[in-house]
Every structure is written in C-alpha cells, then in structure tokens.
Image (tube, rainbow, N blue to C red):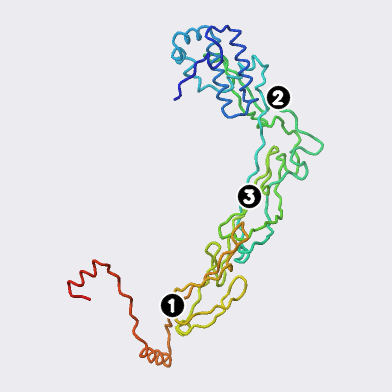
C-alpha cells in the first residue's frame, strides 16, 4: 500500500495555516478536481485526497492529533475508515461551498444489443466476394411514438419521486458527520420522467420489433468462420444510445474439386499407372476455368505443380494466391483377366523397385566394415 502524503502538502498550505487559508485552498482544489468538472484520469482520486485532508485539518481535535502523531493519530478514526465511505459523503462538503452542484441526472443512454447470425456462401463467393441481402428482425424506435413511449399528443412528466433528476439522495448521520447515499430512482429508473399515458403500439416501451432487409457486402478472400460486421445495423439503443452492430458469421460450402489453404487453392489430380509412366497433357479445373497441365513422363506420387496467381484473393488485398496441384497415383484394385495378363507381362520387363539405402553415417559404416557387412 502506498504511503499517504502529508495533508498540508496535499492542500498546498504551511503547517501554521489558519482555518480561512485551509478553506480557501480547499475551495480551489475541490473545484479543480471535482469529477463533475474534471474527467481526467486520476481526478477523482485527487478529489478524494483533498477532501480527506480538509476533513482532518478543518477539525481542531483531528488536526491536533495529526500534528502530534501524523496519520497514526487519525487512522483509528477517520483515516482508517475513509476508503469505505460512499463518495456521496464528499458531496456534503462540496455542497457547503458550491451550492449543491454535485446532484445531476443519471445518464440512461444505453447502446443497443448486437445481432449475430450465420450466413452461408459458396466457395466462389468467398474467393471473389459478393453482396447478399439478409432479412433480420430487430428492435427499432416505435413507429407511432418515435421512441418517446407516450401516446401521440402527450408527453412524459417529471418524476414525482426524484423531482426529475433521476437519483434519490438519502442523508444519514454517521459517526463522523453526515453521509449521503445516492441511488437510481426506482420509479423512473434514472430517466427523470414517467409515462402517464403510454403509447398503445409499444405499450410505453418506446421500441418495437420489425423485419428489415439489409445488404451485406462480403469482401473477396474471406474464409469459413470469418465474421463480417455491419456497424449500426443491430438493435436500437435506449435513451438516445447508439444502435448495436450486426455480425454475420460465414459458412463456406465445399467445392466439388477444390479446397482452400489460406489464399492458395489445392486440387488433387488422380493418375493411373499408365498416365504417370507415360505423361501427357491433362485439363485441370481452376477458379478461372480449365488449365492444360503438362505431365512429365515418370511423374511420382505426391509431386506438386503450382500455377502462379490462380488461387484465391488475399483478404483486403488485390493479389492472389496460387493453385497447387498434387499428383495422386492410383493403384487399381480390380483387374480383369486381360489386364492382369498385361500387368504380369509388364512386370517381367521392369526392373524390381529398389528402395534407397539408409545413410547410416560415418560411425555406422565403420561398424559394418568391422562386422564384414557391406
């Protein structure tokens, strides 16, 4: 816990300051740091610190204890319990100097709730972007009373419980003086007004549900699971608050032949033994139409070919990824008699496949030489 500052230093006065000098210093600092006037970070803490210092030094007995024993002289009383006091208690001190300016209407403006929904798009729409129209149900200001809540021709009236300020102040006598507790008015819920003749359309709520069609622009390059945000297209706010947002989470349907890996598009090209051995030219599907790919003779399973710039568009960029073609040599699992005979004849003419020897390293080769193994 940080060490407390000297009370005289906080108020900026000398230790022999008179009551009038203390009062003048307090008025200046309280006005400077009061949260109603100063919204800077730390202003409220400084205001509390100033009030604590003045509360002690303006009391003859507390000041005497403080001057003799320092903070220890007041920690058994005001100093120790200070942090637990309601901030409204400082309003009594401020009101005494500045005419009760701490009382203010509670802000009831609330941001509207967000709307979240799913949107299914095709593989091509995700790659190149698109524009879709969504039908949503959202809460909007009442079409009859325009959000007021009262029947047309009538207006809300000042709340009789709080006098229109939206807050109720209750002052209690405590051990160290009067303390004020400020709560939101239960009757008007902080608005300061009550509706006596409610609108029949919205029953005084001021809002109603409506079906709306909203255009959603899907940028090029999005992928499955991405979310598109439409600012201000959610439910309307309360008490003048801003509307929420609309979030559409994308579900991209599978393509018949292609799949995505970021901005790259992958196509698995199956070849039979003859095609892999002899090579040739094959049309492969791409996002821009068929592409004639030259297959070299003797191509191996897993070989990769790349078509530059034939992939998906990078999100928020104009460049495109590549299309990657992966060779899959397919082994036939059902052969007729003629095919079996031809494969046997072919096998007699082929050299047996030899797996590459494992490189055992220098030590491994030395060990084999001593053991007589080659």
Secondary structure under tag 2 reads: loop
Q: Residue at x 64, y 62 (%)?
A: 129
Identify which residue is drawn at 63% across, 50% down: 115
Looking at the rendered image, the quarter that the C terminus falls into is: bottom left
Towards the viewer: 173 or 27: 27
Q: Earlier in the sequence, mark 1 or mark 2?
A: 2
Q: Which SS class for mark 3? A: strand
Percent of width and height locating residue 351: 35, 86
Q: Is 82 left or right of 139, judged from the image as shown?
A: left
Label located before the other in sequence (3 or 1): 3
CA–CA distance between discs 1 and 2?
87 Å
Do the residues bearing badges 3 and 2 touch, measured as CB atoms within 8 Å?
no
Element on which disc 1 rests: loop
Residue 102, image x, y percentages: 65, 22
Find residue 271 and report its horizontal and vertical position in percent.
48, 80
Q: Residue furthest right?
A: 153
Image spot of residue 34 (x, y percent): 62, 23
Q: Is residue 37 above or below residue 15?
A: below
Q: Nearer the viewer, mark 3 or mark 1?
A: 1
Q: For the residue carrying disc 3, how many other residues have a C-alpha within 10 Å: few (<14), some (14-19), or many (20+)?
A: some
Q: Neighbour class for label 1 at 10 Å: few (<14), some, many (≥20)?
A: some
Q: Nearer the viewer, residue 196 or 42?
A: 42
Of the two numbered discs 3 and 2 in the rendering, the one whose residue sits closer to the viewer: 3
The residue beneath circle 2 is: 163
Say if mark 1 contacts mark 2, CB within 8 Å: no
| Residue annotated with mark 1 | 300
Q: Quadrant of the N terminus?
A: top left
Residue tagged 3: 115
The image quadrant of residue 337 is bottom left
CA gap between label 3 and label 1 equals 52 Å
**Residue plotted at (70% across, 24% down):** 163
């Amino acid at each position: 816990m940080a060490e407390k500052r000297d009370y005289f230093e906080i108020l900026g006065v000398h230790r022999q300051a008179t009551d009038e000098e203390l009062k003048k210093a307090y008025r200046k600092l309280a006005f400077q740091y009061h949260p109603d006037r100063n919204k800077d970070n730390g202003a409220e803490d400084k205001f509390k610190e100033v009030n604590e210092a003045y509360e002690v030094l303006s009391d003859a007995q507390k000041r005497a204890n403080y001057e003799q024993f320092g903070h220890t002289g007041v920690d058994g009383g005001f100093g120790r319990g200070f942090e637990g006091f309601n901030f409204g208690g400082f309003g009594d001190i401020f009101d005494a100097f500045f005419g009760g300016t701490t009382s203010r209407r509670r802000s009831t403006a609330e941001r509207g709730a967000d709307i979240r929904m799913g949107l299914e798009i095709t593989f091509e729409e995700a790659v190149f972007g698109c524009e879709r129209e969504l039908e949503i149900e959202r809460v909007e200001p009442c079409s009859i009373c325009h959000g007021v809540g009262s029947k047309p021709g009538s207006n809300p009236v000042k709340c009789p419980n709080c006098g229109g300020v939206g807050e109720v102040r209750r002052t209690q006598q405590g051990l160290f003086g009067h303390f004020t507790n400020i709560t939101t008015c239960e009757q008007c819920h902080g608005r300061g007004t009550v509706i006596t003749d409610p609108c029949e359309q919205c029953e005084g709520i001021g809002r109603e549900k409506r079906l709306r069609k909203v255009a959603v622009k899907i940028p090029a390059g999005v992928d499955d699971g991405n979310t598109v945000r439409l600012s201000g297209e959610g439910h309307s706010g309360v008490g003048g608050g801003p509307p929420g947002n609309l979030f559409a989470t994308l579900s991209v349907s599978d393509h018949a032949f292609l799949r995505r890996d970021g901005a790259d598009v992958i196509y698995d090209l199956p070849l039979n033994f003859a095609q892999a051995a002899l090579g040739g030219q094959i049309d492969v599907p791409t996002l821009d139409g068929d592409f004639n790919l030259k297959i070299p003779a003797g191509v191996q399973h897993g070989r990769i070919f790349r078509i530059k710039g034939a992939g998906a568009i990078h999100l928020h960029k104009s460049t495109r990824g590549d299309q990657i073609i992966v060779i899959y040599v397919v082994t036939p699992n059902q052969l007729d008699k003629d095919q079996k005979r031809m494969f046997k004849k072919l096998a007699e003419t082929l050299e047996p496949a030899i797996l590459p020897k494992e490189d055992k390293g220098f030590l491994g080769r030395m060990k084999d030489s001593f053991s007589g193994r080659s």
